[in-house]
Amino acid sequence: MARQRSPLRQLARAAALLAPMVLVPIVVILAAPPLRADQNDPRLPGLFDQLLLAASPEAAAPIEQAIWQAWTQHSDPVIEQLMDKAALGMQIGDAGMAQRALDQVVALAPDYAEGWNRRATFNYMVGRYQDSLDDIEQVLSLEPRHFGALSGKGLVLVALERWEDAAAAFQAALAVDPQMQGAQENLKAVQEIMGRDI
């Protein structure tokens, strides 16, 4: 069966709205306590163990939030200010402000996974899909358990109509966070599209 373009565009739009990578980090920055952490936070292994055992999305939600809080914190207040500036730029639609802030973050703190993740999100939002994939690979080299980046990779691959790769990315996100509803729904939608194309 031939690919139908309009449902694919609808999936990409819907997936963008469901993406935790896009929606969660901005909220977490505003709500996070003044901890100093990142992907090396010693609490993370225990949180990921709890996430695997969560029996429902509601049970997983506070664990996910605690993980996002650890990921988004940085020991350098300059990096945190730049991340806040990037979030503001994305929120108000000032792409230039967001781009400049995120480029500074990854230049000043190349070992900070969330800086790369935020820039991957930005690149996805402005349609620079290969740049987004490149940034996601940086995230995953620093934090292979980054369920937001894994799910985000699936969204980028949906936009590129690389269905099998997208499905694999959503499955990888669910291997880390089995209750991740956006990844569940996106995986199901991709699998339905793949079934129609057989």
Image: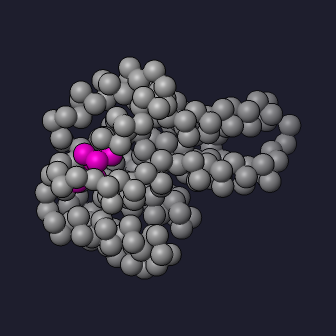
Left/right placement of residue 121 relative to residue 160 reads left
Q: Quadrant of the C terminus?
A: top right
Q: x%, y% of residue 170?
A: 53, 35
Question: Is residue 108 something one can see in this rendering?
Answer: no
Left/right placement of residue 90 relative to residue 195 reads left
- Rendered residue at 43%/44% (across/down): 148
Q: x%, y% of residue 172?
A: 46, 31
Above-or-below relation of 143 to 191? below
Q: Main secondary structure of the magenta part?
A: helix
Question: Is residue 182 something one can see in this rendering?
Answer: yes
Q: Nearer the viewer, residue 195 or 21?
A: 21
Say if the magenta span includes residue 72: yes
Q: Nearer the viewer, residue 120 or 39?
A: 39
Left/right placement of residue 44 relative to residue 26 reads left
- Rendered residue at 18%/69% (across/down): 78
Q: Quadrant of residue 100?
A: bottom left
Write the start and end of the magenta stretch as one range: 68-73
